[in-house]
Structure formats: structure tokens, C-alpha cells
Image (tube, helix red, strand yellow):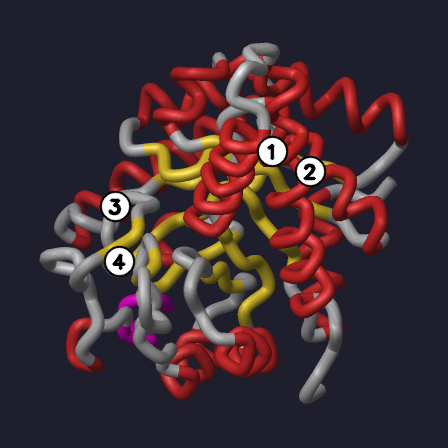
Amino acid sequence: MNSLREIIKDAEERRVAIGHFNISELAALKAIFKAARDVGVPVIIGVSEGEREFIGTRQAAALIESLRAEYNFPLFLNADHTYSVQAAKEAVQAGYDAIIFDGARLPLAENIKKTKEIVEYARSVDPEIIIEGELGYIGGSSKILKSIPEGAAIKDEDLTKPEEAKKFIKETGVDLLAPAVGNIHGMFKDTPNPNLNIKRIKEIYKAAVVPLVLHGGSGISDDDFVAAINAGISVIHINTEIRLAWRKGLEAALLGDKEEIAPYKLLPSSEKAIYEVVKRRLQLFNSGIGR
């Protein structure tokens, strides 16, 4: 089985994207894993600091490793949106395949300093661990939004700049970069998210020497996804869509049988709803449309 580093490099060269989907419990994990196997593509499971606190940092790693070993399938685990050096080190020690240090709200110099510290620590433990840095604030939660999150970089002048990206990568040594290119965390209830700045993605990709990651994928149009992949995006994060599908599936199950109390009889409805979302996204991300 190829390493995650090799798989992302292959995606970059073929102009497709690896899907990254977050979980909080087993129904989502089962749905994502099944969808990836049915489509026949690698997939990354993400667990944020909050999700790791709920599942358990080491327990999440054990779940992913057990599935990967049993099915010999390219399933990988990422410590999503890690905000402290200590939390990043805990994920390294637990054997995660990748870790994101999110210093997007920090001054650039401090973001560089802390990201570099994590990179150096991870390299000392296991050189295969992928470290991702984030440059440009895009909001901080997976919710159904009523308005743009305060401080999120949406205007062109606030987006990640190619020269800053180049400096950040050079000084930190990160393997992946998540820029702000018009994307935001969360999704709007009745309207599409703002359009991505495809031109800026191309400019950052040209300046960078590492693959790019698109966070806040929920709510982005199919056309923007395809254009972003062709502009240089190699990994795409989806979380809010997963949570929304989970809730709708559970609500339908509860309404369908108001007497049922067994979670394992109710949660398959959520699993099915998540499966459909993930399968559709994975097919789009790996379609090669527009190459």
C-alpha cells in the first residue's frame, strides 16, 4: 500500500483530489469507509480537537488502523485543526498519518514559529507523518451559517498571498498548505457559499512547492470544486455536509419509529445519508473533469 504522501503526490500529478471527511462516531466512519471502497479511491478521515476529545485521540487511531489492516485499504487519519503544539505532539505520539496545525489567526511570525516546531518534532518521531500548515483565516466551526464568520478572509486583499505562502512553506518545512482562497468553514442554509478565487489558487500553487488543501468544502459548487482541483488543490475537506446528513438521517429514523430506542437500529439511517454525500463527493473529486 502506498503511503499518504505518495497518494497525495499522485493526486497532484493526475489533477484529482483526495476526499477528507470528519467523524464523531461510528456511523460516519462506516459510511465514509464504505463509500471510498465502493468508489475505489483512498480517503482521509479527519478528527478535530473537539472530535478527538469525544472519541479519544488514541481510540480514533486504533479504529482507523484496525480497518486499514483488516481490509488492506488506503484509509488514513488526520488530526484536523490542531491549535496547540501540545495537542499536535499528542497526535504524533498516537501514530496519526497527518496533522494540521491551525495558526491562521496568529500573526505570521508566530504561526511560522509554532508550525516549524511541530514539523521538527514530527520529523524526529516519524519522518512519514505529514504536517499541514494553514495560512489565512476562514472561520472556525462547521455550522449552518447565516452570515460570513467575523474576520474570515473573503475579499481579494485578505486572501492568502502567494509570496506569504512561499515564505511560510520555506520557513516551516510543511508538507501541505491550506490557504484562504474564498473558502469558509460551514455552509449557508439557503444559498451557495461564496465563489472560490480560482486565479488566486493558481498563483499560490505556482509559488508553493507543496500540494494545496481546500478547507471548508461544504457548500461549494461542483464547478468550483472542479476548477479548484485543476488549479492545484489536491485534498478537499468536507465536514458540515456530513453533520447535516447525520442529523437529517437520525431525525427521519426517529420520526419513522417513535418507540425505537436502540442506537444501532436508528443510526443506520444516518449512515446511509452520509454514504450518499461522501460517494457523490468522491466521484466528483476523482472525475478528472476539465483536465
Q: To which residue does mark 4 refer?
A: 138
Left or right: where does residue 102 sit relative to residue 262? left
Q: Which of 265 and 44 is in front in this view?
A: 265
The segment highlighted magenta reads: 161-166
| Label 1 sits on residue | 28
Give how far across and how far down residue 175 sits, in percent.
Answer: 52, 51
Q: How crowded is mark 2: few (under 14 residues within 10 Å), some or many (20 or more)?
A: many
Amino acid carrying mark 3 in the image: Gly
SS class, disc 3: loop
Q: Which circle's residue, 4 or 2, is located before the other in the chain? A: 2
Q: Characterize the local packing of mark 4: few (<14), some (14-19) or many (20 or more) Cα atoms within 10 angstroms.
A: many
Mark 4–mark 3 distance (CA, rounded to whole Å): 7 Å
Residue 101: x percent and y percent? 36, 39
Label 4 to label 2, Cα distance in Å? 27 Å
Q: In this view, does 101 lie to the left or right of 158?
A: right
State if disc 3 and disc 4 touch (CB < 8 Å). no
Task: Say left or right for 17 vs 134.
Answer: right
Is 200 one of the magenta-colored residues?
A: no
Sequence-earlier tag: 1 or 3: 1
Q: Name the residue under label 3.
A: 140
Amino acid type at image mark 2:
Ala
Identify the residue shown where x is 84% and y is 23%.
69
Q: Which amino acid does label 1 sit on?
A: Ala
Residue 290, quarter of the rendered image: bottom right
